[in-house]
């Protein structure tokens, strides 16, 4: 029932969004079924994907595109995405699933994106779904210190709305660490699950003037677990207090 890109698909999605205000995710399976152009070039791929990216930004939803990989192997999994590099060059993130061996029911998921670091997950196909069996382990990093600083700041402030640069300035009131504004959004996304455990809701909006970050603290949802978080000495007591 779906139309193609540039020939009605965007109107269909916008109409559905207007009828279902809580819509957050649109899955297109597969991308090829809604392509309006038969030309497989970087320019053509980028142009069509830009339409969907613009629509996702406008409606503040996620558009998940299911696409195929090429049969020939490559040292870089993202080079295996079918057609040109225009697809991976336009989207905010790419996930490539490669089965260890045909029929093995095990695979590796490669993840890369503008707001996340490169990441790899080992998966197993169990009970009709792919389940994460293990993932790369990372040593304690400055991300943990950033998380602690955000917690201490927002617990007192209650609410914050502003740019990444403004948030960095605000964090200077609770930490002597030097954080970088170009990493703020990515670090918040990576720590999203832990932020929720601490009673912190995070979202960001994209505008023509840039991204705006929104943080809100709810004390009744704050578990104060603090486990597994490495922080500076000045913040340890706050995060690990009962």
Image (spheres, rainbow, N blue to C red):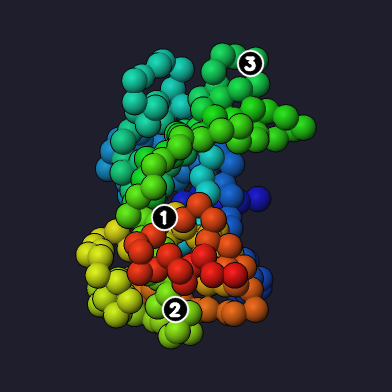
SS for callout 1 = loop
The relative height of residue 133 versus residue 19 in the rendered view (above or below) is above
Position of residue 82 measured from the top left corner of the image (x, y, whole percent): 41, 29
Q: What residue is pinned by disc 2?
A: 154
Q: In the displayed structure, does residue 156 sit left or right of residue 133?
A: left
SS for callout 2 = helix
- The residue positioned 35% from the left and 64% from the top of the image is 233
Q: CA distance from mark 1 to mark 2?
A: 18 Å
- The residue positioned 61% from the left and 32% from the top of the image is 133
Counting other residues with Cα less than 10 Å from the Cα at mark 2, is it few (<14), some (14-19), or many (20 or more)?
A: some
Tell which of 124 and 9 is nearer to you: 124
Q: What residue is pinned by disc 3?
A: 104
Q: What residue is pinned by disc 1?
A: 230
Earlier along the polypeptide chain: callout 1 or callout 2? 2
Tell which of 18 and 226 is nearer to you: 226
* Res. 223 image quadrant: bottom right
């Amino acid at each position: 029932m779906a139309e193609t890109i540039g020939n009605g698909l965007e109107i269909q999605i916008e109409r559905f969004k207007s009828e279902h205000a809580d819509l957050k995710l649109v899955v297109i399976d597969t991308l090829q079924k809604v392509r309006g152009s038969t030309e497989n070039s970087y320019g053509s791929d980028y142009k069509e994907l830009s339409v969907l990216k613009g629509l996702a930004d406008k409606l503040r939803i996620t558009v998940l595109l299911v696409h195929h990989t090429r049969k020939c192997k490559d040292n870089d999994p993202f080079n295996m995405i079918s057609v040109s590099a225009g697809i991976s060059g336009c989207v905010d993130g790419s996930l490539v699933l490669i089965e260890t061996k045909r029929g093995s029911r095990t695979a590796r998921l490669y993840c890369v994106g503008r707001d996340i670091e490169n990441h790899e997950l080992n998966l197993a196909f169990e009970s009709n779904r792919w389940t994460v069996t293990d993932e790369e382990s990372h040593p304690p990093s400055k991300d943990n210190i950033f998380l602690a600083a955000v917690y201490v700041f927002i617990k007192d402030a209650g609410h914050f709305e502003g740019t990444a640069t403004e948030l960095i300035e605000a964090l200077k009131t609770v930490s002597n660490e030097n954080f970088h504004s170009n990493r703020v959004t990515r670090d918040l996304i990576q720590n999203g699950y832990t932020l929720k455990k601490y009673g912190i809701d995070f979202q960001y909006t994209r505008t023509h003037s840039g991204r705006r970050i929104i943080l809100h603290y709810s004390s009744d949802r704050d578990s104060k677990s603090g486990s597994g978080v490495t922080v500076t000495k000045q913040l340890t007591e706050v995060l690990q207090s009962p």
